Image (tube, grey):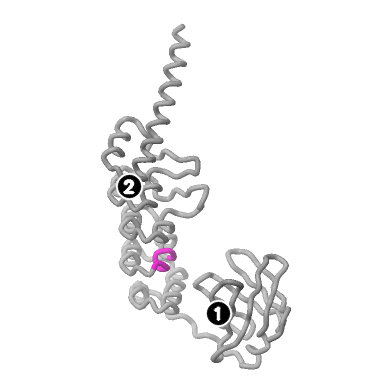
Amino acid sequence: MYRLMFVILGAGLVLLAGDLNDELLTAARKGDLASVKALLQQGAMLEAKTPYGQTPLYLAAMSGREEVVAFLLDKGANAAVRDTFYKAPILGLVLERKHYGVAKLLITRGKGKPDEELPDVAGSGNAELVEAVLAKGKPSQPVLDLRYEVALAQKQTAIAELLKKAGAREPAPAAVVEPEILASYAGTYKTDQVPLEIKVFVRDGKLYMQATGQSEFAPKPKSPTSFELNQYQLQIEFDSSASFTLKQAGREFKFKKVVGP
């Protein structure tokens, strides 16, 4: 009899905790700070999760709720959590939504490392946030140099100055490639690996590439056969005038010319 009562009471407590957690997640998303505080006092879990792994901090940050984010960070909420849908860090998604106040809280009060935070923060174009990242400590030299080169290419003057002051080195000059070699690469290329065409052409002495439905870009020549676009960690290696290998994020794609210039 007593055991049965214990089981029933235990099940009831589990259901109650689940309800509190659901209410906490909703309150955090809405930015209801008073309810967030009350629900935590009542036993809701600081790291409660939705079916997609989103915590109260995650939902508050994504919704731009600065007061709730600040409170949850002070309580020790994990700012490094990733959900199972976007599979991206909170900071990157917050920057994408331009919740810069929240982003600054995550940077200054979170435990993220400069090497992890600088690429997304610099890419946002927000110099104040870059300064906040650098205030936490110096990023590694390769990361610092890469973001500096990207900032120069994108004409992000204020960010480039901050990175230079932090110790970024000047990028190596582009290699000089003969016009005849550049012209030999012109054409339309395809690969069997993905349904994508890339048009290669020359303009004003530079090699340009443009994938189907995307903007054109001019990769920096490292040698007559090797080009790179550091902004997207993209590398292009021409095997001949009729084929090249595109490398990005650990993957390789072999393209062959199907149409001449």
Q: Position of residue 236 (x, y in %)?
A: 62, 76
Say if 144 sits above or below 92 in the image.
Answer: below
- Kindly indicate the quadrant of the structure image that contains residue 132: bottom left
Name which residue lies at 37% across and 51% down.
Answer: 63
Residue 120 is inside the magenta segment: yes
Say if 159 sits above or below 3 in the image.
Answer: below
Mark 1–mark 2 Cα distance, whole angstroms, equals: 41 Å
- Kindly indicate the quadrant of the structure image that contains residue 199: bottom right
The foreground one among 214 and 230 is: 214
- Secondary structure of residue under mark 1: loop
Residue 75 is inside the magenta segment: no
Residue 139 is labelled as none
Q: Position of residue 247 (x, y in %)?
A: 62, 70
**For mark 1, what is the residue?**
219
User: Tags 1 and 2 in contact by the CB under 8 Å rule?
Assistant: no
> What residue span does the magenta drawing correspond to?
119-124
Quarter of the C terminus within the rendering: bottom right
Specify the amino acid type for callout 2.
Leu
The foreground one among 231 and 52 is: 52
- Secondary structure of residue under mark 2: helix
The foreground one among 124 and 177 is: 124
Question: How many residues crowd mark 2 within 10 Å: few (<14), some (14–19), many (20+)?
Answer: some
Q: Residue furthest front?
A: 213
**For mark 2, what is the residue?**
73
Question: How many residues crowd mark 1 within 10 Å: few (<14), some (14–19), many (20+)?
Answer: many
Name which residue lies at 59% across and 67% down.
Answer: 248
- Kindly indicate the quadrant of the structure image that contains residue 130: bottom left
Q: Residue furthest left?
A: 34
Specify the amino acid type for callout 1.
Pro
